[in-house]
Image (cartoon, rainbow, N blue to C red):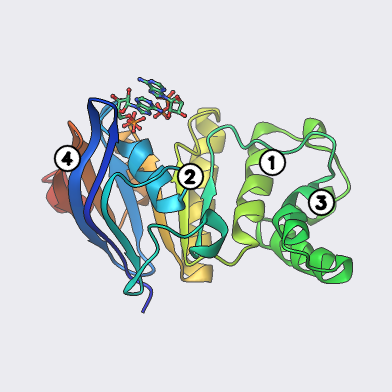
């Protein structure tokens, strides 16, 4: 059981309360979209779960264990960013394997696992290229492979599709849903697009003014037939 639970999670930046004591239980293996207007606290919430931002108060439980104070690499989470941030001087393969290199995994094992991940995102034939020889959508697949190689239980995505043209965006949505089915891990995806949330989410969490305003299946949240 890998349920992720937020307990009264709070983030303050000086006098600004960016996330105000939110509590939520994410279903394991689910696809949750965190939706809401700019500045409502979505990114801060995601960054706290990832460990890229300190928690001001409250707790983050993964499978019942408080991970609030663990370093990002030890939480069982991985994050994919909006601006992919691939290393320009490294090949696709070495970009994907980067976190394993940092963890001291030997080269044959790194290459084997990077190969698996590139197969998963259908980028095998691009393994020896540099990021600037790839399209935006291809770079995004590489960024996904790089996040997934750590075998996270929870994949965190911050506006991952917003830099793509509309055609690629639709394709990547299908790709993300396929990965959710194949890997059985939980996805938490931050977006300000209702259509994106409707297309992807098993569960939609609407944030407003640093609080959770509503949470539930898409049809309930949007009151669709
Ligand atoms: P969203 O992702 O929904 O746009 P954020 O979590 O980025 O919202 O921001 C929530 C609030 O916290 C905003 O008022 C924003 O200006 C503020 N904020 C975010 N990051 C910082 C920071 N590093 N320092 C100060 N204020 C911040
Ligand atoms: P997003 O819209 O995806 O939340 P932003 O463009 O608001 O991202 O923020 C990008 C970066 O700027 C983040 O690292 C965030 O912490 C920081 N930031 C956001 N708002 C503020 C703020 N009011 N003061 C200082 N830093 C901020």
Check contact, mark 2 vs mark 3: CB within 8 A.
Answer: no
Quadrant location of residue 66?
Answer: bottom left
Quadrant location of residue 132?
Answer: top right
Q: In what element is the residue under mark 4?
A: strand
The nearer-to-camera label among 2 and 3 is 2
The nearer-to-camera label among 3 and 1 is 3
What residue does disc 2 label? 52
The nearer-to-camera label among 4 and 1 is 4
Disc marking residue 94: 3
Mark 2, Cα crowd under 10 Å, few <14 / some 14-19 / many 20+, is: few
What residue does disc 4 label? 211
Q: In what element is the residue under mark 3?
A: helix
Mark 1, Cα crowd under 10 Å, few <14 / some 14-19 / many 20+, is: some
Quick check: 150 above or below 40? below
N-terminal of the two: label 3 or label 4? 3
Inter-mark Cα distance, 2 to 1: 25 Å
Q: In what element is the residue under mark 2?
A: loop
Disc marking residue 138: 1
Name the residue located 72 percent from the left edge and 62 percent from the top edge: 103
N-terminal of the two: label 4 or label 1? 1
Disc 1: residue Cβ within 8 A of ligand 2's nearest atom: no
Inter-mark Cα distance, 3 to 4: 40 Å
Disc marking residue 107: none
Visible residue check, residue 225: no
Name the residue located 32 percent from the left edge and 38 percent from the top edge: 42
Looking at the image, residue 162 sits to the left or right of residue 213; the answer is: right
Rendered location of residue 101, percent (x, y): 78, 58
Inter-mark Cα distance, 2 to 3: 23 Å
N-terminal of the two: label 2 or label 1? 2
Q: In what element is the residue under mark 1?
A: helix
Mark 3, Cα crowd under 10 Å, few <14 / some 14-19 / many 20+, is: many
Inter-mark Cα distance, 4 to 2: 20 Å
């Amino acid at each position: 059981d890998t349920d992720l639970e937020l307990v009264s999670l709070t983030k303050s930046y000086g006098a600004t309360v960016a996330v105000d004591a939110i509590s939520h239980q994410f279903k394991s293996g689910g696809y949750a979209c965190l939706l809401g207007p700019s500045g409502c606290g979505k990114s801060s919430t995601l960054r706290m779960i990832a460990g890229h931002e300190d928690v001001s108060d409250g707790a983050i439980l993964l499978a019942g264990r408080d991970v609030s104070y663990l370093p990002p690499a030890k939480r069982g989470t991985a994050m994919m960013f909006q601006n992919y941030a691939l290393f320009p001087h490294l090949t696709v393969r070495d970009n994907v394997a980067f976190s394993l290199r940092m963890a001291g995994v030997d080269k044959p094992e790194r290459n084997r696992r990077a190969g698996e991940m590139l197969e998963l995102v259908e980028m095998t034939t691009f393994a020896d290229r540099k990021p600037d020889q790839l399209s935006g959508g291809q770079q995004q697949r590489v960024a996904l492979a790089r996040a997934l190689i750590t075998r996270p239980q929870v994949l965190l995505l911050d506006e991952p599709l917003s830099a793509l043209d509309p055609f690629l965006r639709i394709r990547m949505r299908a790709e993300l849903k396929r990965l959710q089915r194949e890997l059985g891990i939980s996805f938490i995806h931050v977006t300000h697009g209702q259509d994106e949330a409707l297309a992807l989410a098993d569960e939609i969490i609407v944030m407003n003014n640093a609080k959770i305003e509503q949470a539930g299946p898409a049809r309930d949240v949007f009151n669709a037939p």
